[in-house]
Image (tube, rainbow, N blue to C red):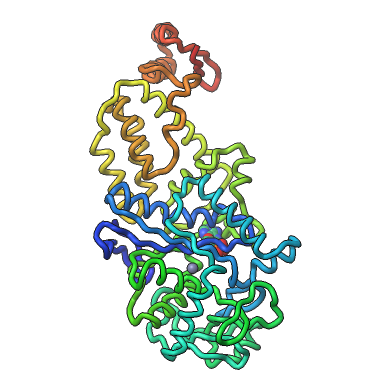
C-alpha cells in the first residue's frame, strides 16, 4: 500500500520490515473527556490502514495505541508544555479521583471505537502503568548527553543535541521562540528555549506523582509514546499515525527522543490525518463545537453513518461536518443495507473481480476512500452484474469499509423479494414516461411477488406483505 509520509512529504510504498507483518503505533486518547467525532476520524485512520493491510495484502497487523492518563498538560501549544495535567484538572472539576476520571473516559473511548467499527488494537498501554519504562528511557537519554536536569528539578531534552530536529514539521530550532507567557519560568530553568520536559518535578502536585532518580514527579507527554513504542514495537517499526496537530511538537519530540536513544530512525513512515471541521471551524473542546457519538445517535443516525461520511473524504483532507452531510450518509447507508438484503435473496454468484480490484486499488493508493465509494456506487447500479454477485462484492468489500452492510440480511419485513427491485425501477421509469398501462401491468406483477405499491407526489412507495 502507498501512504503519504509526512516526513518525506511524498506518497511512499509501505513495505513491512518484517515480511507480511505490519507494525503500527497510533497516538491514542487523553482520557479526561469524551472523544469527539473529530478524534474518532483520526482513530479511523489506523483502522483503514490495518484493514487494507489485512484484506488487500493479507498481512498480519500489530497495532499499539496508548492511553494517556497522566502527563498531558492543559497547554501544550507552548514549545515547552506548561500548565496543569488535563486528567487532574478534570478530576477536580468533577470531584473524582484522577484514576476514576481516566478509567471512565477510557471505557467511553473503547465504546465509541466499537460504535464506529474501529477494530481493537493489539495493546492499549496506559501511561500511568509505564512509568518505569519512561524512567529507564530518560536515564538512558541523560547518560547519552541528550537530556539534563534543569535548575527547577525537571529533566529536559536537549533539543540542540539532536541534529535532525524538525524533519517532520519543517520547524527549525533556531526559528522557534519561547512564545508563551507561561514559558518564562521554565525558560530560565532550561538551557535552550526549545528544550522540553521529559520528567517534571512534582511541585505542588500531590496526585499522580512517582519517585524518580530526580525526586518525585510525573512524566512529560511526548516521552510516553517513545517509551511505549520502543518497548512494544521495537527499535524500528512501519507506521506511526496521529492527527495533523500532533506533527509538532508531539511527534517531532517523540522522534528526537527515540532516535537519540537508539541511534537510528525508528519510525519508517509518519502518517497524519487532517482535521474534522464543524460548521467551518476545527472541531475542538476549546472552540466549543464538539459533536459526540451520543449526539449523532440523538439525531436519529446510525453511528456508522459517521463512518460512511468520513469515508467520503480522504484522510488527508479537511472535512466539514454538516447536518445535511451526515443525514445524506445515513440515507446512503440504509439504502446499501436494504440493497444488500435484497440481493441476498438472489442466487449467489461470484463477486465481479474488476470491481473488487478497483476498490482494492483505491484503498491501496493512499486510502482513496472517496474513489472506492464511487466504484461501489457504480456497481450498485450496473445492470450487467447479477444481484447475487453484487451481494458477494458488497459483503466482501465491507471488510474494508466496516459499515455492517449485511446487517439487514434476513430481516424479512423490509426486504424485497428477488426481482422486485428491477420491477420497481422499471415501473418508476414507466411512470416517468407516462406509460400508465405498463405501470399498471408492473404493479400487478409486483403484487404477485407480494409487494404492494402506492403512489404519491414523492414517487412510489412499497411494502412487503
Ligand atoms: P487527544 O485525545 O486530545 O489527545 O486527541 C486524540 C487525537 O485526535 C489526536 O490524534 C488529535 O490529533 C486528534 N484530533 C483532535 N482534534 C481533531 C479534529 N478536529 N479532527 C481530527 N482529529 C482531531
Ligand atoms: Zn503520541
Q: Nearer the viewer, residue 343 or 66?
A: 66
Residue at 29% in and 48% down = 56
How far across and how far down the image is residue 98, in percent?
Answer: 67, 65
Q: In this view, does 397 lie above or below 176?
A: above
Residue at 24% in and 39% down = 354
Q: In the image, is 210 to the left or to the right of 13?
A: right
Tell me which corner region of the image, top left, top right, bottom left or bottom right, holds residue 89. Answer: bottom right
- What number of labels is visible? 0
Q: Which of 418 and 267 is in front in this view?
A: 267
How far across and how far down the image is residue 218, in percent?
Answer: 60, 77
Q: Nearer the viewer, residue 112 or 176?
A: 112
Is residue 243 visible in the rendered image? The answer is no
Residue at 51% in and 41% down = 305
Q: In this view, does 74 lie above or below 347?
A: below
Q: In this view, does 383 lie above or below 169?
A: above
Task: Name the quadrant of the N terminus.
Answer: bottom left
Amino acid at each position: 500500500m502507498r501512504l503519504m509520509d509526512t516526513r518525506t512529504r511524498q506518497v511512499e510504498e509501505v513495505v513491512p520490515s518484517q515480511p507480511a507483518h505490519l507494525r503500527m503505533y497510533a497516538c491514542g486518547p487523553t482520557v479526561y473527556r469524551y472523544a469527539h467525532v473529530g478524534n474518532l476520524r483520526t482513530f479511523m485512520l489506523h483502522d483503514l490502514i490495518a484493514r487494507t493491510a489485512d484484506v488487500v495484502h493479507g498481512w498480519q497487523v500489530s497495532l499499539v495505541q496508548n492511553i494517556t492518563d497522566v502527563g498531558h498538560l492543559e497547554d501544550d501549544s507552548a514549545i515547552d508544555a506548561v500548565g496543569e495535567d488535563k486528567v487532574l484538572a478534570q478530576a477536580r472539576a468533577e470531584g473524582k479521583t484522577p484514576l476514576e476520571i481516566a478509567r471512565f473516559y477510557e471505557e467511553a473511548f473503547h465504546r465509541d471505537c466499537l460504535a464506529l467499527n474501529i477494530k481493537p488494537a493489539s495493546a492499549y498501554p496506559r501511561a500511568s502503568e509505564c512509568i518505569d519504562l519512561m524512567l529507564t528511557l530518560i536515564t538512558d537519554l541523560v547518560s547519552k548527553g541528550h537530556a539534563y536536569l534543569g535548575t527547577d528539578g525537571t529533566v529536559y531534552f536537549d533539543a540542540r543535541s539532536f541534529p535532525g530536529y524538525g524533519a517532520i514539521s519543517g520547524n527549525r530550532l533556531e526559528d522557534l521562540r519561547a512564545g508563551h507567557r507561561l514559558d518564562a519560568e521554565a525558560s530560565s530553568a532550561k538551557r535552550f528555549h526549545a528544550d522540553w520536559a521529559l520528567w517534571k518535578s512534582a511541585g505542588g502536585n500531590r496526585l499522580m506523582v512517582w519517585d524518580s532518580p530526580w525526586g518525585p514527579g510525573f512524566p512529560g507527554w511526548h516521552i510516553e509514546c517513545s517509551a511505549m513504542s520502543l518497548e512494544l514495537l521495537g527499535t524500528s517499526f512501519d507506521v506511526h499515525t496521529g492527527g495533523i496537530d500532533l506533527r509538532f511538537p508531539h511527534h517531532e519530540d517523540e522522534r528526537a527522543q527515540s532516535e537519540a536513544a537508539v541511534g537510528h530512525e525508528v519510525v519508517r513512515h509518519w502518517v497524519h490525518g487532517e482535521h474534522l471541521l464543524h460548521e467551518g471551524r476545527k472541531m475542538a473542546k476549546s472552540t466549543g463545537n464538539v459533536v459526540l457519538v451520543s449526539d449523532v445517535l440523538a439525531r436519529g443516525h446510525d453511528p456508522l453513518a459517521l463512518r460512511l461520511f468520513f469515508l467520503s473524504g480522504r484522510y488527508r483532507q479537511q472535512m466539514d461536518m454538516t447536518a445535511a452531510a451526515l443525514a445524506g450518509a445515513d440515507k446512503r447507508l440504509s439504502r446499501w443495507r436494504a440493497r444488500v438484503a435484497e440481493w441476498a435473496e438472489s442466487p449467489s454468484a461470484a463477486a465481479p473481480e474488476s470491481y473488487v480490484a478497483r476498490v482494492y486499488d483505491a484503498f491501496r493508493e493512499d486510502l482513496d476512500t472517496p474513489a472506492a465509494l464511487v466504484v461501489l456506487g457504480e456497481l450498485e447500479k450496473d445492470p450487467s452484474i447479477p444481484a447475487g454477485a453484487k451481494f458477494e462484492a458488497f459483503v466482501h468489500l465491507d471488510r474494508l469499509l466496516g459499515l455492517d452492510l449485511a446487517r439487514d440480511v434476513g430481516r424479512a419485513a423490509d426486504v424485497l423479494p428477488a426481482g422486485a427491485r428491477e420491477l420497481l425501477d422499471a415501473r418508476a421509469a414507466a411512470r416517468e414516461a407516462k406509460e400508465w398501462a405498463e405501470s399498471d401491468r408492473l404493479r400487478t406483477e409486483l403484487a404477485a411477488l407480494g409487494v404492494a405499491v402506492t403512489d404519491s407526489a414523492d414517487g412510489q412507495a412499497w411494502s412487503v406483505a
